[in-house]
Amino acid sequence: MTDPNLAIIVLAAGQGTRMKSATPKLLHELAGAPIVSHVLATAGALDPAVVLAVVRYERDRLAKVISADLPSAVIVDQDEIPGTGRAVEQAIAALPADFSGEVLVLNGDVPLLDADTLLDLVSRHRTSGAGATVLSSIVPDASGYGRIVRTDDGSLDRIVEHKDATPEEHAIGEINAGIYVFGLNALRDQLANLSTDNAQGEKYLTDVIELLRRAGSDVAAVPVDEPWKAEGINDRAQLSEAAARLNALIVRGWQLNGVTVQDPATTWIDLKVTLENDVTILPGTQLKGATTVARGAVVGPDTTLVDCEVGEDATVKRADATLAVIGARASVGPFAYLRPGTVLDENGKIGTFVETKNARIGEGSKVPHLSYVGDTTVGRGVNLGAGTITANYDDILKHRTEFGDHVHTGAHNVFVAPVRIGDGAKTGAGAVVRKDVPAGALALSVAPQRNIEGWVEKNRSGTAAAEVAERARSAQEADDGSQRQDG
Ligand code: UD1
Ligand code: CA
């Protein structure tokens, strides 16, 4: 149910210089979604009256992602005055005129926070009647974070930024998580009093705490139950740590839901992936995007699936696949590369060292070894020989190759598209098929074999080959002679 007295501000205007990246920090991904998307999902789950997202650096790229994730979010542009305080100041100016209540501020770079922690913080704030309630965290390495400075009686005094802190303050292990609940009026009054007189020349939101306290408001800092939830991402080392943490949670969630994951440490599963009971995931597997895997399928080892659909009881071993559909009881790999548009029907097989693209392979049909099959339709019960190549590209256009049902082709064939092989047809080994093959025909395109007797002995005399050839020929002649006598 919507909370009409709660507004959420997501801070997403910073550049994230510590990432050293052309991509804005909040668009770097974990579990298949940008950092900011995780924060927006949590904000949306609280169902507040309004979500405001503050942008500035690469604002169009950020705004596009934010609007796609949460279409109701209000995008607020931060001006050239820097700092989290300025960002919040501009966001509250964009609040609906009739809004009154609490403002929850979320740093956009803290992606692992869950909705329950936030709801708890909001309700503590409301029952305490404080002017501000800050989420804090006690961490082993507080370096870089704002520190929670408490008075002798243990209550919150102020927050000091790392760059402004004294050596004694640097020793404080309790940090500001960058998550705050404020009463709207108290916040608005104090934002007006912020200055940029600090080490970074920014309007710090954190200074509002001290200002509120001096104005006679209560302020409180509440430590989070699990410090990892409040970890902010500033550099790529922190990004990989947060990604590993989230992945461990996702993997464990699937394990408790009936999926066998043999090695959680080398298994990566994106948030949007769905898995049915009794799926088995073997080591070194990455399931990305909107991949789905049905009951009983075995995926891995060493497999990457991006936006794929895997059917019941299928096996996919040492494969790399994108936008592919793998049917029930089908088998893929080891060492297969399925490119977009591959559809392998039930009981089909794409085997070892096979690449497919935009190819439909019918029920029970097999491409077992060393092949490239692209822009192709294969009927049912077909077997394509080892070393099949569909030559789909003539330098200008891509053309299709079509195989009917129950076609069996010889080893090492080239199908020069466009070409159609009719139902039940066969081709000989080494054929280069340039013309359609009618149903039931046998296509041969290789010249008959000619053996030139004695060629090696005559032209390569003195070599090991000539020596063994001579020995074999003599033995054969002796054998023929004795057979003649016997007869
Ligand atoms: C901030 C806090 C620090 C806290 C830490 C927790 C301040 C002054 N400091 O520091 O006390 O321990 O978060 O992770 O708030 N942003 C804007 N506009 C700006 C600057 C930043 O929207 O002008 C956004 C950023 O995109 C980011 C968030 O605010 O999502 C925090 O900014 P960042 O620069 O990472 O702050 P920290 O130095 O980590
Ligand atoms: Ca940060």
Image: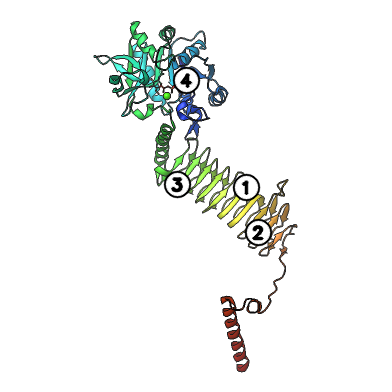
Which residue carries the number 3 mark? 284
Q: Which mark is residue 357?
A: 1
Labels 4, 2: front one: 4
Type of residue at label 4?
A: Leu
Give whichever of discs 4 and 3 has the lower sequence position.
4
Q: CA distance from mark 3 to mark 2?
A: 36 Å
Q: Residues within 10 Å of mark 2 (few under 14, many from 20)?
A: many
Instruction: Examine the rendering and report whether any part of residue 63 can be seen.
Output: yes
Q: Which mark is residue 406?
A: 2
Q: Residue furthest left?
A: 152
Above or below 312: residue 126 = above
210 left or right of 335 in image: left
Q: Residues within 10 Å of mark 3 (few under 14, many from 20)?
A: some
435 left or right of 114 in image: right
Q: Nearer the viewer, residue 483 or 361?
A: 483
The image quarter containing residue 169 is: top left
**Tag 1 and tag 4, C-beta contact below 8 Å:** no
Type of residue at label 3?
A: Gly
Instruction: Examine the rendering and report whether any part of residue 365 can be seen.
Output: no
Give whichever of discs 1 and 4 has the lower sequence position.
4
Element type where label 1 sits in the image = strand
Q: Which mark is residue 11?
A: 4
Q: Nearer the viewer, residue 466 or 385?
A: 466
Horizontal and vertical percent for residue 102? Answer: 42, 13
Give whichever of discs 2 and 1 has the lower sequence position.
1
